[in-house]
Image: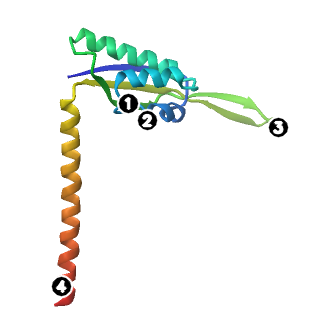
Amino acid sequence: MEAKATLKTYRQSPRKVRLLAGDLVGQSLDSVKVTLEMAPKRVAPVLLKLIKSAEANAREKKMNTENLRIERFSVDKGPTMFRMRPRAYGRAFVIRKRTSHISVVLVSGEEDVGKNQKKESVKKEGLKDSKTQKVKSKKKVAKA
């Protein structure tokens, strides 16, 4: 089961928000809260509030809130406000005020972690095997 929370049109560029949000994926909720309380970024209190909202949504769904972790943190581009600034010789300079759409997905339990890791390892092993088979077959053809 998963719990979600979203924040639309947050007035900071997605690039700056992703700097902090990217490091939080996969961590437990307790460690994320500590990290965000100590982070020196402007977006840190906003992300903390968003995570608390997702946790409250998990409680409403009757999920176990003790072992929640962040599965996905997506920061997408929102609408951009354009402003004009006068410059020399009667020209105008465009100022772009960018916004972000932030969403977080929380999952509970250790069972989800194991499933995802197994799928990834199987995919990686399959890729390695197929590559080595291609290389071996090329060498056999070259020798013959």
Q: Which mark is residue 141?
A: 4
Choose the circle earlier in sequence order: 2 or 3. 2
Dot 2 and dot 3 residues touching (CB under 8 Å): no
| Image color mode | rainbow
Work out whether mark 1 precedes mark 3 in sequence or the reverse, and give the earlier one.
1
- The mark nearer the N terminus, 1 or 2, is 2
Q: Residue shown at 22%/59% (left/top)?
A: 127
Which residue is most to the bottom? 144
Residue holding disc 3? 88
Residue type for callout 3: Ala
Secondary structure under badge 3? helix
Spatial CA distance of label 4 from label 3 is 69 Å
- Kindly identify which numbered label has been placed on residue 35: none
Q: Quadrant of residue 66?
A: top left
Q: Where is mark 1, residue-wise?
A: 73
- Residue at image x 34%, y 17%? 54
With 61 as the anchor, is 87 left or right in this view?
A: right
Residue 137 located left or right of residue 48: left
Q: Residue at x 73, y 30 (%)?
A: 85
Identified at 58% across, 26% down, the residue is 40
Q: Amino acid at mark 4?
A: Val
Amino acid type shown at disc 1: Phe
- Closest to the observer: 32 or 83? 32
Which numbered disc flags the more N-terminal residue, 4 or 2? 2
User: Height in image: 96 above or below 29?
Assistant: below
Location of mark 2 (residue): 22
In this picture, is 99 found above or below 127?
Answer: above
Q: Alpha carbon of mark 4 to alpha carbon of mark 2: how far?
A: 46 Å
Of the image marks 1 and 4, the number of the one nearer the N terminus: 1
